[in-house]
Amino acid sequence: MPAVTPPVCDFDWQAPHFQLPATDGGLHSLDSVRGENGTLVMFICNHCPFVLAILDKIVRDADELKQHGIGVAAICSNDPVAYPADNFENMQKMALERGFSFPYLHDADQKIANAYGAICTPDFFGFNSDHGLQYRGRLDATRMGASAPDLRRELFEAMKQIAETGKGPVEQIPSIGCSIKWKAA
């Protein structure tokens, strides 16, 4: 499966609103997950090896970012018929097993992935408190497989900077991952 890379950050692009069902049984919107100092919206899934390689770091960073006033949500937009590992039941299992402290949302009709222009898993969108995009980069330099424990925490540092200044770093390295698994037309 070829890797896909999203475009560079379009600074101050406004976050599209959403209201989606979550693995915790609730409905969550952009406003309900919003943090006082910003919001991180992540497009992930259950089966992508790029996501699985960094999932523990995603959970760690999400927990720590909350201490900086950053709200966090993850969205799975993959076609659950063609990719049953990404169906809602398996999303619920993953969220429970991996201890997600953030809502894991199901974008069944893929409208939110389209609205955001998400193209891969993982695809990170870091917004300031005004919902202006400030980061569309990678978590860190991890690829598939094990990574060095001392990699620079690029996503965490960028979101912390956004929490403190409202602005993201000028230099950003795009994420890389599997393409969103779109439904057949």
Image (tube, grey):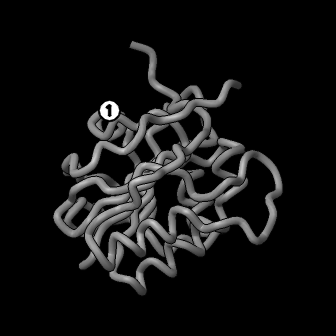
Residue 4 visible in the displayed image: yes
Residue 45 picture location, percent across and down: 56, 46
Question: Between residues 167 and 126, which one lies in front from this camera angle?
Answer: 167
Residue 10 picture location, percent across and down: 30, 43
Compared with residue 180, is residue 142 higher up or lower down, i.e. above or below? below
The residue positioned 36% from the left and 45% from the top of the image is 9
| In this rendering, position of residue 136 left or right of residue 90 | left
Q: Name the amino acid type tagged 1.
A: Asn
Residue 117 picture location, percent across and down: 34, 34
**Dot 1 corresponds to which residue?**
114
The residue positioned 54% from the left and 59% from the top of the image is 92
Question: Between residues 29 and 56, which one lies in front from this camera angle?
Answer: 56
> Which residue is at the far top?
185
How many residues crowd around disc 1 within 10 Å: few (fewer than 14), some, or many (20 or more)?
Answer: few
Number of numbered callouts drawn: 1
| In this rendering, position of residue 91 left or right of residue 125 | right
Residue 179 picture location, percent across and down: 55, 30
The residue positioned 37% from the left and 58% from the top of the image is 126
Query: Where does the N terminus fall, quadrant-wise?
Result: top right
| In this rendering, position of residue 110 left or right of residue 50 | left
Compared with residue 136, is residue 148 higher up or lower down, i.e. above or below? below
Residue 88 visible in the displayed image: no
User: Where on the picture, by quarter, is residue 37?
Assistant: bottom left
> Which residue is at the far front?
170
The residue positioned 50% from the left and 32% from the top of the image is 180
| In this rendering, position of residue 42 left or right of residue 28 | right
Query: Where does the C terminus fall, quadrant-wise?
Result: top left
